[in-house]
Amino acid sequence: MIGLRKKIVLFITTISYGVAFTQESIGVVLDNYQPLQGLKLNPSAIVDQKPWLSVQIIGAHTYGRNNAAFLNQSTYINRAEEVSFNENRNKYSGYSDVEIDGLGASISLGNYAIAIHSGARVIANAKGIPGELANVINDETNTPADGTYNSNFARAKGMAWGQVGVTVGKVLFNKGEHYITGGLTVNRLFGFGNANLIINNANVNIANGNATLNNLDGKYSYANFSLNAGRGWGTSFGLTYKKMKDEVSYYTPHSTLYNCGTVNYKYKIGVSLIDVGYINFKNEAQAANFNEEMTTEELEAIYEEGSDATLNPSRTFNTSLPTAISGQFDYNVNDYIYLNASVIQKITVPSFYGAERDNLLALSARYESKWFGVGLPITLQNYKHPQIGLALRMGPLSVGTDHILPLFVPTDIYAADVYAVLRFNIMKSPGCRKPKPKKQKTTRYKKVYCPAWK
């Protein structure tokens, strides 16, 4: 059984090392001057956006957390030479999210808005891995105590995919100081790879250092890495209500009637359903259920030798996206300082193949102006791991982290996060730009001979 165990905990360890390169990059998705980041959390963010046109060149974000491997009393700069292992957990888990944003653009078209975007993403997570199993794998010379060990609802999942998509937004209601917008995103998805191991129930008996698999109930899926491993579709939908500071019954963003800009809000409330969809893997893919009569040798052969004779697997399978519902509240203090509270609750069926995201609660304050911005988010990943972040926007470049404490203070590092975005904004539409004053032609007067009349 060690071979299969080794793979599971190596999966967790890989996640722990993945901290070098997303949570939800709260420091940039809330920024009103970065609509292409904001639409990830709520597609209606592109409607009534601050810039008339925002062009994103590239962006990257990586986040990782686990409760198994850590760097002992380290900072990001002065790190421990070796990774330590926490042997005092009953259950082990880990999560890693890497996202690359490609070229994209978002434009305001009066009461409408449209955005095109592209990118790639990798999400891997493990949950419910028994502590005894992880400890044995961390040190194979360590013999567990004799006994019977149960594992219920343990799973390890990983999926990589790319996407190109379009987001369309519209003003749905504007009267008095009330303003409601909606947005819809549709993505074409390209699956790159997938691996899932889902164990609903397993019973392992250990005697004299030997493990015997008594029963097993679960399933697995796998697709070799390829740029054409699978195809699918994804969508997100969002609504935003704004209590505006001025009358907006006749308001059109970036129109000459409103000084070619936008009207500020007192506060706004948003709700969104994000990452709903699937990817169908069928290129060098297989998926099957385990059965209780399977031996340990047959189970290991699936992962170590690629044998599937016992299971008769399907050669195609569907995976789900990391679906979630989100709510956002944003309060405008003085048109430069904003206070925000946001929550992201995953909607996941653990037995489904695919990617799972983590839950998130975030409280943040930020300063915004045309050329400069700073955000201070406080986040609770899965509602229990507190983190303090910092985000800076300087002209076209934004950089930040949602977990900045290990940059300065030595601590046991179980998580890390970093992101960067490069983009440029055009604030005014062509019709609102003042024409350059024409140069006046100067007339040179020449002396003209004029005969005198006598």
Image (cartoon, rainbow, N blue to C red):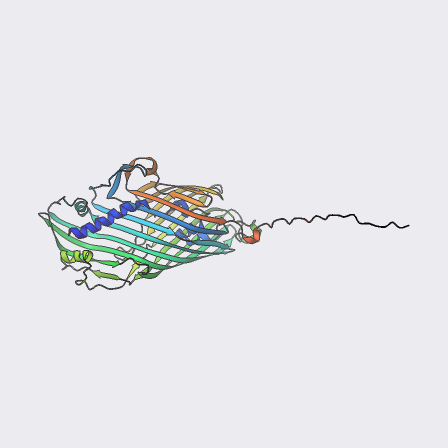
Left-right relation of 240 to 130: right
Query: Picture coordinates of residue 46 (x, y %)?
Result: 45, 53
Query: Picture coordinates of residue 158 (x, y %)?
Result: 28, 53
Query: Picture coordinates of residue 107 (x, y %)?
Result: 48, 54
Left-right relation of 300 to 184: left
Specify whether residue 368 is in view: no
Can you name the residue that lies furthest to the left here? 208
The residue closer to the viewer here, 75 or 132, is: 75
Residue under the point 37% across and 57% down: 163
Question: Quarter of the image holding residue 383?
Answer: top left
Residue under the point 57% across and 51% down: 432
In this view, 56 is above or below 230 = above
In this view, 138 is above or below 220 = above
The residue closer to the viewer here, 42 or 156, is: 156
Q: How many marks?
A: 0
Query: Picture coordinates of residue 27 (x, y %)?
Result: 40, 44
Residue under the point 36% across and 54% down: 120
Specify whether residue 446 is in view: yes
Left-right relation of 387 to 34: left
